[in-house]
Image (spheres, rainbow, N blue to C red):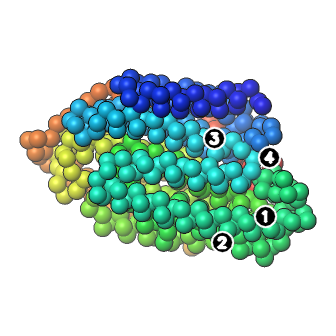
Amino acid sequence: MIPSLAVLIAAMVVSSALCIGLRRSRHVSAVMPACAFVLFALCLWVCIPVLRGETIDDGLFWMDPLSAVFMTLVGFIGFLASLYSRAYIGLEAEEGVVSRKENGIYYSLLIVFISVMMLTFTVRSMAVVWLGIAATTLVSTFLVGFYSREESTEAAWKYIILCSVGMTIALFGLTLVYASTVGVIDSDSALDWPSLMEHASELDPNMMRMAMILIIVGFGTKVGFVPMHTWLPDAHSQAPSPISGLLSAVLLNCAMYGILRFYGVSESLDPGFASTVMLVFGLVSLGAAAFFIVSSRDLKRMLAYSSIENMGLIAIGFGIGTPVAIAAAILQMTAHSVTKPILFFSAGNIIQSYGTREMSRIRGVYRSMPFTAAAMTVGTLSIVGCPPFAVFVGELSLMLGALDAGMSWTVAVMIVLLAIVFAGMARNVFPMLSGEPPEYARDLKGFSRTAPLVVLIVATTALGLFMPDAVVQCLENAASSVTGVFS
């Protein structure tokens, strides 16, 4: 095995075992973020050469630039969510909301969750990728229902039932893909993505069309495509805020990764079919999310609908299907991943201070929590696509990709719906920041509250203002690998 990858996988196993072993100790809250930092550092060691165009090809393990983009985002956001958890879960432990036992369970599940997501992007077999995505569902269910309240338990059950149905549908799609490889690819490598790309033109097109519909619907359930999205607002609103940020920023990407691998095979065999299905789901998801955002009353549910909106935008990029649009979709995914945790972490601070998620009951955040209010402002302006932040560049690139493909009608629809999103977010967020705060509102401070927000704000601003040639090359490499250049 490649030494760097072997060290990373060993670190995942050791970190998970260490945190599980220390779950009854008060030190687990410090050990777990340290382990997450080590995983992120090792992730960079593995991924930077791959992002530059190299491919890891070693038996069961296989990585290309697309895998590296997804893994890097998991490592980065996973570490920041772990660091923010120290303050967020720490306060709840002090106030008796969380017991010492629950505190240990939280950190143990979190490191396993991050490790499983990262591991999903290291394998060549799409069957194993399916297992990895299914495993993330199982682990994250316990984090969604962490508080054991009636609402949290209901959200967790809804999440696991709907996503399990989706994963079963995706499995049927994988079965059809496997059937289409009979007589074309050896059975022991029939679901290996490099083999599928190499023999894509020889597969049965009718069977692959059926498979792609099942795969997009199945994995799309976990992505949050409308109308399979109903679990997402409940799960994101009921989970602890660090977990909500992690779910939104990187877990949805895991399911999108499963779609993209088969998308590349389908587009090589039958150009236009998978991209059309993705375009339809993208536009429907963007439209529905826009109107849900306007009507939202719960802060975290609104942010969840914003995640559906951004997954819709990403799907539109792959629906356009040109190299420019695919690169723009990957840029939009990256921008969303580094921006959305700003909002969820800021929302966590506000909810802990005000004791409510109802936006109508939150006022005067700028007076009571100046830093959190500033972070919420930056996060809101960024996520709705205002310059100079990363999402603006991603959305602009998507529109340019659509114009380049002659799809001006798509641009017109996007502009209208994004204007509705902007109006809805502004209507809901900015009244919370102004006015007079209630007497019980308090400013929550501390390194592990502020540092993750500062890092994320710098990241989304830097991605919006600067686009070095090295970053452009990484995006182009990842976009090319979607269609099999690096197979």
**The residue tagged with tag 2: helix, strand or loop?**
helix
Give SS at disc 1. Answer: helix
Q: What residue type is disc 3 on?
A: Leu
Residues 465 and 80: in front is 80
Q: Can residue 87 be seen in this view?
A: yes
Residue type indicated by callout 4:
Phe
Task: Point out the tag, 2 or 3, that comes first from the N-terminus.
Answer: 3
Q: Name the residue under label 1.
A: 178
State which tag comes first along the sequence, 3 or 4.
3
Residue at the image position 13 percent from the left and 44 percent from the top: 437
Residue 158 position by quadrant: bottom left
Q: Quadrant of the N terminus?
A: top right
Q: Give the residue drawn at x 88%, y 59%.
A: 185
- Return the residue at label 2: 213
The residue that label 4 is drawn on is 486
Mark 3 to mark 4 CA distance (whole Å) = 20 Å
Q: How crowded is mark 4: few (under 14 residues within 10 Å), some or many (20 or more)?
A: some
Residue 119: numbered disc: 3
Say whether residue 249 is visible.
Answer: no
Q: Which of 414 and 110 is in front in this view?
A: 110
* Distance from Cα at disc 4 to Cα at disc 2: 25 Å
Give neighbour class at mark 3: few <14, some 14-19, many 20+ (Cα, 10 Å): some
- Residue type, numbered disc 2: Ile
Mark 4 or 1, closer to the camera: 1
Q: Where is residue 480 in the image (x, y as percent from the top left)?
A: 74, 50
Query: What residue is drawn where x is 22% and y is 37%?
Result: 96
The answer to which of marks 1 and 2 sits earlier in the sequence is 1
Q: Which of marks 3 and 1 is nearer the N terminus?
A: 3
Nearer the observer, 391 or 355: 355
Q: Position of residue 256 (x, y in %)?
A: 60, 56
